[in-house]
Structures are given as C-alpha cells and as structure tokens.
Amino acid sequence: MNFYRDLRGDGLSFLIFTCKSWCDGLSIPPPDLDEWRRKLFVVEGTILMSEDEWNTYWPYIDNVWSHRSTQKSKKGPFDPNKKKRKRTARERDLCEMKIKVIETTAPVRTFTVERVKREIVGGVAVGTDDGSGSGGGGAGGANAGEFHRHTLEESDRIKRNSMEKELKKVQVSFYFSAGGGGGDDGGGYLPFVYDSHISSHRFYLPTTTAQQKTYHKKASGLALQTVKRHSKPNDLKLFSSCFCLSPFLLAGTYSNIQKRVWIALEVKGINYQYIEVDPYKKPANLLEINPRGLVPALKHGDWGCYESTVLLEYLEDLHVGQPLLLPHPQIRANSRLWCDHIDRHIVPRFYRYLQEQDPAKVPEHEEELRVEIAKLVNNADAVGPFFLGPFISLVDVSIAPWFLRLRRVLQPYRGWPPADENSRLGVWIAALEESPPVKNTTSDDVLYLESYERYAENRPNTSQLAMAINAGRELP
C-alpha cells in the first residue's frame, strides 16, 4: 500500500535544542543532522529514506512543511500526474515550494521525498533561486515555485519542530516531577542548552522566540479554588490578576506586588470578592478607581484605592482580623524599613538577575541578590520561622511572592540553588510555603514558569519594569 502526501513550505522551521542525558532519546542529536536538515529543506532530486532515517530526521524538519493532503492507494501505486479536482483557495503570502512524500509499506517501509513540479502562471516565476535554499526571486524559467522564498535561518526564527516541542514538555515535566531540586546531578533545574551551533550555557532553560506563551488569564491550582470561594458579590472587592503583564502590555506593574494584598486579606480572614482582571479587557469599575487600570485595587463600598503599600496600610487600619504590624512603634517602624528594603534592593536585583542575557554577568547578579536577601534574613527573628517569630507579619507578606519564585522561576531559568532546609532562610521559605494564606493564593508552578519566560529571554517591550531594569532606572 502506498501513501502520497503533498506538503507545502510556509517559511517555517526550527532551532534544535537538546539537554542532558536524562532527556533520554532527545539528549543527543543524531549523526549528520545538519546535512539532513539541508537535504530535507532544499530537496534536490529524489531522496529515498529508510523507516529509521525518516523517524530520526523528519521530526527535526517537519515544521518547515505544512501538511496539505493525504491520499491512500487501494489499487496499486499512485500516478503523480493524475489530474486532481479543481480547488479554490485564498491568496496568501506563503512559500510556493511543495514536496511530495511517498510512503511505501511493502516489502519494507520506505519514504521517498521529491519536489512537486510547478507550472508558470503568466510567465512569472516566484521565489526561484540557485537551489541552495537561500531564497531570491526571478521571472520565467521552468522551476517556478520549486524553491523556497526564504532561508533556512529565516525559518529557524519562526517555529519550533516536533523534537523541540517534545523536549520542552520533557524538561518541564522533569523539573517539576523532581520537586525543583537542582544541580548537575540531574535532579531538578535544567542547566544545559545544546544545539549544533550554540555552545552550552549553565543558566538558561531552553526557549525560543517561536510559539511564545500567551499570557495567563486566570489563576490555577489552590489559587483558583480561592478565587472561586470569593467569587460572590461583596462590599469589599479586590481587583487582581494571576499575572498582570501580557507580552505587549507596557503600562504594567510587577505581578508579585498585587499578590501581597491578596495574602493579607487571607491572613486577616476578611471576606471579600475577588475579581480577576484581564489586562487587555479592563472592567469599567476598575478604571473608575485607577484610570490606568493597574492592579491591585480595592473598592470598599463607594470608595476605591490602589497601590499595594497603601492598600496594606488600609487593611491594617480596619482593625479586623490578625494584625500585620505589632503595636510597639519601634517594631512597626522596623518592619516598614525592611519592607522598603525588599522593594528597593531585592525586587530590582531579582529582575536584573533574571533578565541578564550575558552568562558572564549572571554570577555577579546572583551574588548581589544573595547579599540583599542575607541582610533581610540576618535581621529576622533568630528562631522564626517568620520574620518576627511564630506569626506572619507585614514583612512576610511583602517577601513571600519573591521567596516562592526563587524555586519556581530563578531555579529553572538561572540555576538558583535551593536553600538548605535547616538554614534560617530555608526554614522561613518552608514556613511560607506551608502557610495557608500563602499556599491558597499560589497557582501551579507551570503558570509562573511560562509567565516569566518573557523576562528570562529579556524580550523587547515586555513591561515598563523590564525596560526600567535594562535602563538602570528606578522601578515604576
């Protein structure tokens, strides 16, 4: 039985990434991969592939081609010149090159790949070149539409192939199934990126500009359950977002800040209505409070306000539930001082470390962040487990989102080592992870990993915060 597959080049291709040996079959590129990529991109003459060769090399090139049709033979081989029914399709600016893949299953399974001859329409040949796959154009000639209108390198920018997609799934699955433990022993974070052209680096989880993640519109995990419990109308409304920055939203603040207010409400046990905000579709009642539409924001009856530090003070002034600041004036002042330290010194260094693209500079930023965290830890209660001792206070609410992202973001993207569980920092982080107000406002790990991808790649126009970090300015 034969199969005929008509594939069309859409200017889409891939970059090849592999990781450490624990990625099993994805770990080592097959031999002569570059040569096979070129052959299956240019398709000069007829290429006969064994089943093993097809299964090995086609997944590395499959996204250069989009599947157009499949025909199954019931009465022997197909006649490639057989007249087909007339079809009408919309005009699209696509590569005109097409190939056919003939799969033969008897006596042995083989695959034959060759170009589809194209007719000249109006005497114009679109996208002809010298057969090197370097693109170009021309008029006339018998090979109209038989060459790519783009280079393989141009294709590499646009879309990842099946092997890279599968590798990304394996990496994310491995990371989280390993519990986030890190190190070169293969347990946890993903320290190496390889391909046939790029040297290995310790600090980068493999990502590409192709198929970038869309922003998350709602919480997940325990945070989603908390959202549902607080979905009923209430006089006190919290406008928030699971991640308040979309890839192209410049007028944004960093999402961890808004989580502080949410944690505080849970600590105090105040009843409220949670309103999830899509940064592209801001509700009118939020814009009435904050014309910029930024979260967090609170509406209490007819009154509304925004800015997380102001909102935390407001909740404290309601004198409802567990206080976040102790009555003693000096302790209150000291707590506010260390909250300021978090915003001025820890948060900027977190993002500077995450956004750095030069591997030579990453250790420097890592050490700067470590030093600022150590200052905070050294001024915490010696026994803990929280900043002031056995109970959560304002400082814990302020630092919790960042401590949780050490494992969820910095560890997979930059190889941040986990804290010793017996150290003061390790005890503090463990207590926050197990604290119901923090745990119940935390989404699944994948949400944070995907949401911070744009920061880890330092994409242009990620946010005002990212641009401020790159420019060395104060955070917005």
Image (cartoon, grey):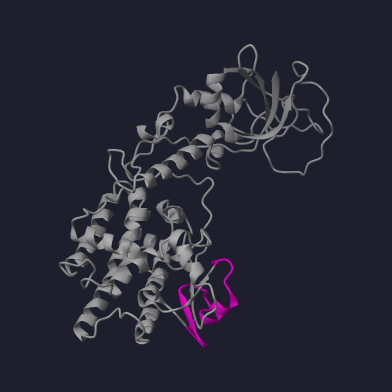
The furthest residue to the left: 382
Q: Residue at x 53, y 40 (%)?
A: 160
For the question of whether residue 132 can be seen, the reply is no
Q: Position of residue 438 (x, y in %)?
A: 36, 66
Q: Position of residue 161 (x, y in %)?
A: 54, 36
Q: Position of residue 243 (x, y in %)?
A: 47, 63
For this view, does 256 lie left or right of residue 374? right
Q: Residue at x 50, y 40 (%)?
A: 165
Q: Nearer the viewer, residue 422 or 229?
A: 229
Rendering quarter of residue 470: bottom left
Quadrant of the rendering where the N terminus is positioned? top right
For this view, does 283 lie left or right of residue 225? right
Asked if 332 appears above or below 251 in the picture, the reply is below
For the question of whether residue 176 can be seen, the reply is yes
Q: Nearer the viewer, residue 40 or 264?
A: 264
Q: Position of residue 100 (x, y in %)?
A: 68, 25
For this view, does 199 lie left or right of residue 69? left
Magenta-highlighted residues: 278-304
Quadrant of the rendering where the C terminus is positioned? bottom left
The furthest residue to the bottom: 302
Rendering quarter of residue 327: bottom left
Q: Residue at x 26, y 71 (%)?
A: 341
Rendering quarter of residue 464: bottom left
- Inspect the magenta stretch and tell me whether residue 55 lies in it: no
Asked if 412 appears above or below 84 in the picture, the reply is below
For this view, does 370 lie left or right of residue 229? left
Asked if 72 appears above or below 377 in the picture, the reply is above
Total labels: the figure holds 0
- Inspect the magenta stretch and tell me whether residue 302 lies in it: yes
Q: Nearer the viewer, residue 305 or 268?
A: 268
